[in-house]
Amino acid sequence: MANQAQAVSDSAAEMLQKRPRSHELNALLGLVGIALIFEILGWIFQGQSFLFNTQRLSIMILQVSVVGIIAIGVTQVIITGGIDLSSGSVVGATAMIAMSFAQVSTYPRAVYPELTDLPVIIPILIGLACGIVAGMINGLLIAFTKIPPFIATLGMMVTARGIAKWYTKGQPVSFPTDSFAALGQGMTPVFIFLAIAALFHVALKYTVYGKHTYAIGSNEQAARMSGINVERHLVLVYTIAGLLAGLAGMVIAARGLTAQAGMGVMYELDAIAMAVIGGVSLSGGRGSIVGTLIGAVIFGVIISGFTFLRLDAYYQEMIKGVIIVAAVVADVYRQRMRPRSR
């Protein structure tokens, strides 16, 4: 048993310290290449630079940061060998609920009209609690009923979207207090994204939490035999993913100064794409926060580049789907080639 525990620990350490570096480097090279391609196309078709435009880059970074917060949680879920399809719906439900507690008293409230202006900490805590509950339910279902993560999170996706529509009967919730609106103003979303990325980079790379996460994704049975409480850890990972989706919901609501039931549609797929583009393996056991960070920037550059080239929105959606499938195919190819390289 001790030898098995040591083997799992060594395997986790190897994946944490060695493998992610090559994928991070590949992702970084890919980012440089894609950015240069759009720069060349920009001069050819638009007669102007794509990269050297401060306003365009600021908008791109802001757009990436909201989904990037979700992607950090999704990354950890995928590393365990799971998946989370509920993130976008949790964003919508959390945005509606949190915003209803953050409205100014002079605005006729859709819900809770008896409440006056509340301290900003209250809607923030309520929003985080919504995300935690959604993520914990996902984790409990997956860990203790053994149903596939795809099914459990798909059910939460539908349920959370229904809650978002039911909560105010489809009516938007607007006019937040200035203190709540500050969460989404200026570059605050970017700072939140980077702070969370740094936190979980350290957690995955240098703590027991990270070693257990990689060990479960690499070989769940071996992790269990080595003494890791797999069920408890899975609940924790999915709860963190829900928490971050809830936080993203509040940030996007504060940024737009309104919450609508349709917020967050397809965000879960964008987050998964960012993680996979950054080198996170859908088979589990491999990936890093730094890789996801680079993947988020790549994703943002591609979408911003298409907009810059004035590509119609429906073409962008189709190409986005192709990118997601291509990233998964590339991951499968890497998995097949890895044993041959040994």
Image (cartoon, rainbow, N blue to C red):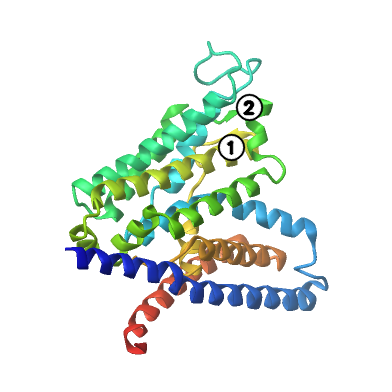
- Disc 2 from disc 1: Cα separation: 9 Å
- Kind of element beneath mark 2: loop
Q: Is residue 286 visible?
A: no
- Kind of element beneath mark 1: helix
Residue type of the residue flagged with mark 1? Ala
Find residue 176 and name its label: 2
Q: In the figure, is residue 212 to the left or right of 226?
A: right
Q: In the figure, is residue 70 to the left or right of 151?
A: right
Per the image, the residue denoted by label 1 is 253
Q: Is residue 46 above or below residue 166?
A: below
Q: Quadrant of the N terminus?
A: bottom left
- Sequence-wise, the earlier of marks 2 and 1 is 2
Viewer-nearest residue: 253 or 225: 225
Q: Is residue 93 above or below residue 187?
A: above
Viewer-nearest residue: 194 or 18: 18
Viewer-nearest residue: 281 or 98: 281
Residue type of the residue flagged with mark 2? Pro
Quarter holding residue 155: top left
